[in-house]
Amino acid sequence: MIKVENLNKKFKNLHVLKDIELRIEKGEVVVIVGPSGSGKSTFLRCLNRLEEIDSGEIIFEGKSITDDKNDVNKLREKIGMVFQQFNLFPHMTVLENITLAPIKVKKMNKNEAEKVALKLLDRVGLKEKANAYPSQLSGGQKQRIAIARALAMSPDVMLFDEPTSALDPEMVGEVLEVMKQLAAEGMTMIVVTHEMGFAKEVGSRVIFMDNGKIIEQGTPKEVFDAPKHPRTKEFLRKVL
Ligand code: ADP
Ligand code: MG
C-alpha cells in the first residue's frame, strides 16, 4: 500500500530524515517509536505531503505522491490523519466538523454526509455529542471526534501522531479502545505513540527511529523483548 524509497528530508541544514526505506502492506498496524526529535512526526507529514521531501520517493497505492501529475488532494483523501492536538474547528459543531470535508471535497450531499457522520459517532461512542461544540468536550472525546472526522473520508490508511499524548491519563484508554477496534476491522494504520501496551497488543510491526533513521524494526515481541540495537535498548529501558 505504501512504499517509501530512499526518503530524505531537510529543514535548512538540519537533516531530519535520512534514507528512509519502508514498505507497508494493507491491513498492517505499524507502530513508530523513538525519542523526541528523531523525525517521527516529520515522517508522517511527508507521507501525506504536508512536508515536501528533498529526495526519494513515496508511492501510495501505486502512485507517487510527489509526482505533480497525480492529484495530491485525491491521494490525501485516502490518507486520514489524527494529531496530538485534535485540530477540530472550534466554531463548528461536532457534526459540522465531521461533515465538512465529505461535503466540500467529496461533494457528498448534506443528508448523506450527516448519515455517515452519525454512524461514525455511534462507532466512537459519541452519538449524543453531534450538536456539541469542541469546547464542550473532554480531551478524550475530542480525539474520538477527530478520529471519526478522519474516517468520514473513508481513508485507506490512518496516520496517528501521538494521539494520546495530550490527554489526561484517565482518557487515554477510551481513545486507544477506538484505535484497537479500527485495527481489528482491518484498517491500515501507522501510529506514532509512546503507549507500549498498545504497540504490543495491536502492532503488527514496531519501528524504532533515532536521529532521522530507522534503526530497528520487527514484531513487537522481537523489538520489545529482544532489541538488538544499543539505542533501542536504551530507549526501551527508559519507557517500559
Ligand atoms: P519527533 O516527532 O520524532 O519528535 P519531529 O519530526 O517533530 O520529531 O522533528 C525532527 C527534527 O526536525 C527536530 O529536530 C525538529 O526540531 C525539526 N523540525 C521539525 N519540524 C520543523 C520545521 N518545520 N522547521 C524546522 N525544523 C523542524
Ligand atoms: Mg512528533
Image: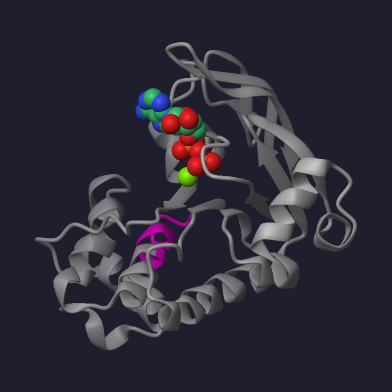
Q: Position of residue 47 (x, y in %)?
A: 53, 35
Residue at x 31% of width, y 73% of height: 139
Q: Is residue 159 visible?
A: yes
- The part of the chain drawn in magenta is 147-155
Above or below, comparing residue 66 to residue 155 in the picture? above
Q: Residue furthest left?
A: 91
Position of the N terminus by quadrant: top right
Q: How many marks?
A: 0
- Depth check, front residue: 151 or 207: 207
Left or right, 222 with respect to 207, comes to right
Left or right, 88 with respect to 215, comes to left
Q: Position of residue 20 (x, y in %)?
A: 69, 27
Residue at x 51% of width, y 80% of height: 173
Residue at x 61% of width, y 74% of height: 180
Left or right, 183 with respect to 99, comes to right
Residue 124 included in the magenta stretch of the image: no
- Depth check, front residue: 61 or 132: 132
Q: Is residue 27 visible?
A: no
Residue 153 included in the magenta stretch of the image: yes
